[in-house]
């Protein structure tokens, strides 16, 4: 029996978020430059996106570049931005064919203009697609997002549009760049690292975490199926007892 056929289609995670990690180590193992790893990571993005869409997952968020990644060597940053532009340009047609909508979260102001332009064009072109939403976290960090949310809320309070006593966790949801996107049910991190690295701190409050030693460029559809099958064996209690869930 194939892994895919073991997946219960009724209990799919509606939203999967992935920290795509290990490109540099993958390249190093092969005696190549880090960018070779990033280039090979693109086919894993394709694999994960295709597999998720085929299964019927509604949202897939990929952590592609963090706020902290700007501190990498300049050459690597430039190469990553170039790769991003060329990949978006090449893949927009495939997104259209597969009815996939592209969105982005993160500080778009920091992106090189060419990169922003390409991204914006793909987001606009795919905006009416309905099968799945692919969210790219780009120049993203959760602390950046939460700080911005707090700033906008503070402005509204100052202008008298909002009372401090009316602030709920929903108010915070609504001011984050992930507004409108359901919280991830499943968060996957590749490459054997067990940390969040400033990814979706608020939204992952009740997500199931899945860690694999597989380096991102080796990640394929089967790896995604494995993660989903593992997720489906878990009991999500949301603070309740197991007995309460059975009712
Ligand atoms: C993930 O791979 C890609 C990005 C963070 C852009 P890394 O580049 O972090 O690879 P490792 O972790 O150094 O192996
Ligand atoms: C996290 O990976 C960010 C992305 C995958 C884009 P990093 O490789 O930057 O994370 P750390 O620095 O090892 O925590
Ligand atoms: Mg890394």
Image (cartoon, rainbow, N blue to C red):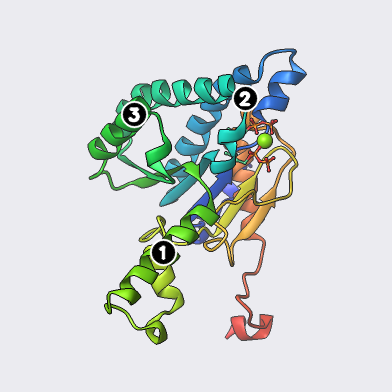
Q: Earlier in the sequence, mark 2 or mark 1?
A: 2
At which x and y percent is residue 238? Answer: 60, 75
Q: Nearer the viewer, residue 205 or 159?
A: 159
Q: Residue 146: in sight, yes or no?
A: yes
In the rendered image, which quarter contains the C terminus? Answer: bottom right
Tag 2 residue: 73
Mark 2 burial class by Cα count in 10 Å: few <14, some 14-19, many 20+: few
The answer to whether residue 66 is left or right of residue 119 is right
Q: Residue at horizontal 74%, vertical 15%?
A: 30
Give the image quarter of residue 67.
Answer: top right
> Which residue is disc 3 drawn over?
113
Which of disc 3 and disc 1 is earlier in sequence?
3
Q: Is residue 106 left or right of residue 72?
A: left
Residue picked out by circle 1: 151
Q: How many neighbours does mark 1 have within 10 angstroms: few (below 14), some (14-19), or many (20 or more)?
A: few
Residue 31 horizontal side relative to residue 235, left or right: right
């Amino acid at each position: 029996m194939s892994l895919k056929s073991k997946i219960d289609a009724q209990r799919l995670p509606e939203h999967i978020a992935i920290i795509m990690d290990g490109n540099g180590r993958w390249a190093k193992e092969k005696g190549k430059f880090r960018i070779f790893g990033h280039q090979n990571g693109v086919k894993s993005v394709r694999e994960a996106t295709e597999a998720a869409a085929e299964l019927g997952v509604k949202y897939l968020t990929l952590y592609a570049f963090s706020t902290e990644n700007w501190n990498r060597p300049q050459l690597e940053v430039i190469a990553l931005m170039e790769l991003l532009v060329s990949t978006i340009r090449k893949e927009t047609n495939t997104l259209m064919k597969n009815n996939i909508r592209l969105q982005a979260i993160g500080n778009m102001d920091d992106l090189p203009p060419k990169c922003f332009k390409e991204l914006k064009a793909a987001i606009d072109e795919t905006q009416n697609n309905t099968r799945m939403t692919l969210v790219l976290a780009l120049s993203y960090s959760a602390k950046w997002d939460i700080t911005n949310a707090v700033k906008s809320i503070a402005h509204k309070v100052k202008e008298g549009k909002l009372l401090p006593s009316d602030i709920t966790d929903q108010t915070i949801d609504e001011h984050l760049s992930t507004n409108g996107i359901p919280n991830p049910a499943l968060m996957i991190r590749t490459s054997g690292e067990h940390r969040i690295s400033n990814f979706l701190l608020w939204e992952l409050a009740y997500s199931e975490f899945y860690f694999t030693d597989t380096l991102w460029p080796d990640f394929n559809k089967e790896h995604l199926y494995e993660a989903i099958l593992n997720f489906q064996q878990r009991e999500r209690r949301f603070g309740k007892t197991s007995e309460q869930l059975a009712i």
